[in-house]
Image: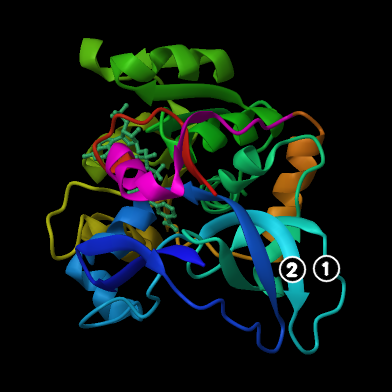
Amino acid sequence: MKAVVQRRYGSAVLGDLDVSVPGQGEVLLEVRAAGVDMGTWHLLSGKPYLLRFLGFGLRGPKCPVPGRDVSGVVAALGPGVTGFAVGDEVFGTCEGSFAEYAVAPVSRLARKPGNVSFTDAAAVPISGGTALQGLRDVEPGQRVLVLGAGGGVGSYGVQIAKALGAHVTGVCSTRKVGMVRSIADEVFDYTAGDFTGAYDLILDCGGNRPLSRLRRAATPRGTIVLVGAETGGAITGGFERALRAAAMNPFVSQKLVMLMSAERADVFDELRVLIEAGEVKPAVERTFPLSEALDAVEHVYSRRSIGKVVVTI
Ligand SMILES: NC(=O)c1ccc[n+]([C@@H]2O[C@H](COP(=O)([O-])OP(=O)(O)OC[C@H]3O[C@@H](n4cnc5c(N)ncnc54)[C@H](OP(=O)(O)O)[C@@H]3O)[C@@H](O)[C@H]2O)c1
């Protein structure tokens, strides 16, 4: 099969690999599309270095094929798999979706929403799942602020918070204002002045503002969810801000959350329901063929992407 092959951090090429055999609790997928997110860039580059100590491979990537978000068709069942059949259309996450075939554990797969394409479905799992898990505290009528609203997690964050009945304000740079305006109640273009207001929940997917700035924008008993940051350098990548928030949390009236999202079938199923109800629509800006998968990752890393980017197989 054709696949993007990565033996070392920082370099990958399109090559040929044998198709893997699914093990216990796994299925073989004929991949139709693979979503791209900031995490894909981190795993390709091996940066921040902290992630190499978190089980992804110290000297080189454990998985020789990048890509985690996937949509596709079940091509074969491994031992012990129930609830899925050959030919089922699914979406979720796996190791190595930048390939014609990938093996995926069924614990990370759900049925593809019936009303969207494979391309749109592949744009959902990690970003949509992260946003969903970051918004668990939201109640109808609350005010929610989404930083990085023009990105992958942020575009789902805005839509899911709206679906939960919140009044949602998105913050983004000028190029992304049009997309964010189409899904949020209010938009701040931070290049023209920073956001104002008091919020019950802040979902921070941009990550370049100090915690003190976020705390001033949250209500006294508000929640601040730190999703990610890209401004902390090559060693920790800004992770220390979230760690500081978690350490501070027991001593303040606000709830400070360091989000570690889980990739699970039940989360993807919740997203499927939201998508089929028309409450969430994947905001796919651009697709790339498998031969240009690295350009797709670079497009996201460069901050040029608006919403989501997908590799189609
Ligand atoms: N905690 C978790 O479990 C989890 C799960 C998934 C992702 N993440 C992290 O969450 C963050 C958002 O992920 P994503 O996939 O949504 O990324 P994305 O699509 O690139 O969106 C991030 C947005 O943040 C803004 N931004 C502000 N400063 C930035 C900077 N220095 N570098 C890059 N973007 C910056 C950009 O918007 P403007 O151009 O409008 O400023 C961009 O649209 C990333 O750090 C990612 O690693 C964490």
The reply to whether the magenta stretch includes residue 96 is: no
- Give x and y (percent) for residue 139: 67, 37
Viewer can see residue 220? no
Q: Would residue 291 be counted in the magenta stretch? A: yes
- The answer to whether 146 appears left or right of 215 in the picture is right
Residue at screen point 65% across, 30% down: 281
Q: Nearer the viewer, residue 94 or 277?
A: 94
Q: Which residue is the site of mark 1? A: 86
Residue 8 makes an appearance in the image: yes
* Location of mark 2 (residue): 75
Q: What stretch is highlighted in magenta?
A: 279-299
Closest to the observer, 240 or 180? 180
10 Å neighbourhood of mark 2: few (<14), some, or many (≥20)? some
Alpha carbon distance from label 2 to label 1: 5 Å
Q: Does 71 appear above or below 304?
A: below
Q: Inspect the image, locate mark 2, and give the three-letter code of the amino acid beneath it.
A: Ala
Q: Nearer the viewer, residue 21 or 186?
A: 21
Task: Provide the secondary structure element on which disc 2 rests.
Answer: strand
Expressed as whole percent of the image width and height from the top left, the position of residue 65 reads 41, 68
Check whether the beta carbons of the residues at disc 2 and disc 1 lie within 8 A of each other: yes
Which residue is depicted at the point 63% across and 84% down?
21
In the rendered view, would you say 147 is above or below 106? above
